[in-house]
Amino acid sequence: MKLQRLLNLTRKAVEEYQMIQDGDRIAIGVSGGKDSLTLLYALAGLRKFYPHPFELHAISVDLGYQGFDLSPVRELCESLKVPYTIVPTQIGGIITAAGRESHPCSLCARLRRGALNQAARELGCNKVAYAHHSDDIVETMMLSLMYEGRFYSFPPVTYLDGTELTVIRPLMFVWEADIIGFKNKYALPVVKNLCPADGHTKRQEIKELLRELNRQNHGVKERMLTAVLNGRIPDWPTRQGKYFL
């Protein structure tokens, strides 16, 4: 995927769900993975021409694993002229001590979100951008359907009462395969995930199931995404027309 295509899909999400307004200061959660680095590129590019001016600040939450080197991310932020902050934590040690029986992935996610949101507020940001893409939306819907018995997926825009921050997901119309292509084409400096649970989660099982379903019935993931977009899910904002690419 070329940069212009990425910018078009990002603007489509931002326009249709009114994600960005004049004067927003947006924190980008940057883990060092391909998704968050693609989001960094997308918003840094959109900032140059979007009619509603906004500021960016990239934030990485360091989980405390030995050997986790974020210097390539810092260099990328410098090249894109995006301020960058690393938040040191001991979340990795907390998760290791808790053990697998305590649902470490959900605990880790809560702790990481808390550290990210706190840093965003301290830096004067009013919004936080997450790098969830189309596959994440469909996978979350399937997880909810299979393990909670309800049709649900996270909304494109969420206001967090407790922190007075608004979460936005500008990559919601970008598929993971396109992000992989973008990562390869632009040589994104991906930082290896050192989490011992990486690749051994219920989400990974759902990802593999969807891959097989899509292989047998081409386009099934796209149709599932359409079902989510049109599903009138509670908490989802109204879609503002359609931005044509």
Image (tube, rainbow, N blue to C red):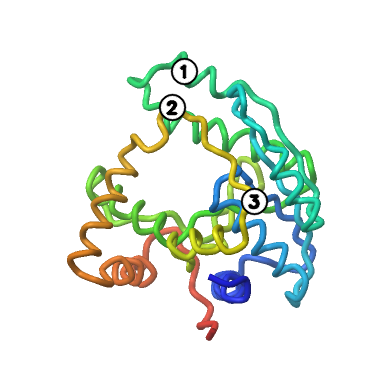
Q: Quadrant of residue 152?
A: bottom left
Residue type at mark 1: give it. Answer: Thr
The reply to whether dot 2 and dot 1 touch (C-beta < 8 Å) is yes
Pointer 2 residue: 196
Q: Which mark is residue 58?
A: none
Disc 2 versus disc 1: distance between alpha carbons?
9 Å
Residue type at mark 3: give it. Answer: Val
Tell me if residue 198 comes above or below residue 170 in the rendering. Answer: above
The residue located at (56%, 58%) in the rendering is: 183
**Badge 3: few (under 14), some or many (20 or more) residues near its Cα, within 10 Å?**
many
Residue 218 percent location from the top left of the image:
24, 71
Q: Disc 3 on helix, strand or loop?
A: strand
Residue 108 percent location from the top left of the image:
49, 30
The reply to whether dot 3 and dot 2 touch (C-beta < 8 Å) is no
**For marks 3 and 1 on the same chain, the one whose residue lies earlier in the sequence:** 1
Pointer 1 residue: 96
Tell me if residue 91 comes above or below residue 213 in the rendering. Answer: above
Q: Nearer the viewer, mark 3 or mark 2?
A: 2
Q: Quadrant of the C terminus?
A: bottom right
Residue 68 percent location from the top left of the image:
62, 30
The residue located at (39%, 69%) in the rendering is: 229
Disc 3 versus disc 2: distance between alpha carbons?
27 Å
Q: Disc 1 on helix, strand or loop?
A: helix
**Residue occupying the far top of the picture:** 97
Pointer 3 residue: 128
Q: Disc 2 on helix, strand or loop?
A: loop
**For marks 2 and 1 on the same chain, the one whose residue lies earlier in the sequence:** 1
- Residue 13 is left or right of residue 89, and the answer is left
The reply to whether dot 3 and dot 1 touch (C-beta < 8 Å) is no
**Badge 1: few (under 14), some or many (20 or more) residues near its Cα, within 10 Å?**
few
Residue type at mark 2: give it. Answer: Pro
The residue located at (55%, 46%) in the rendering is: 33
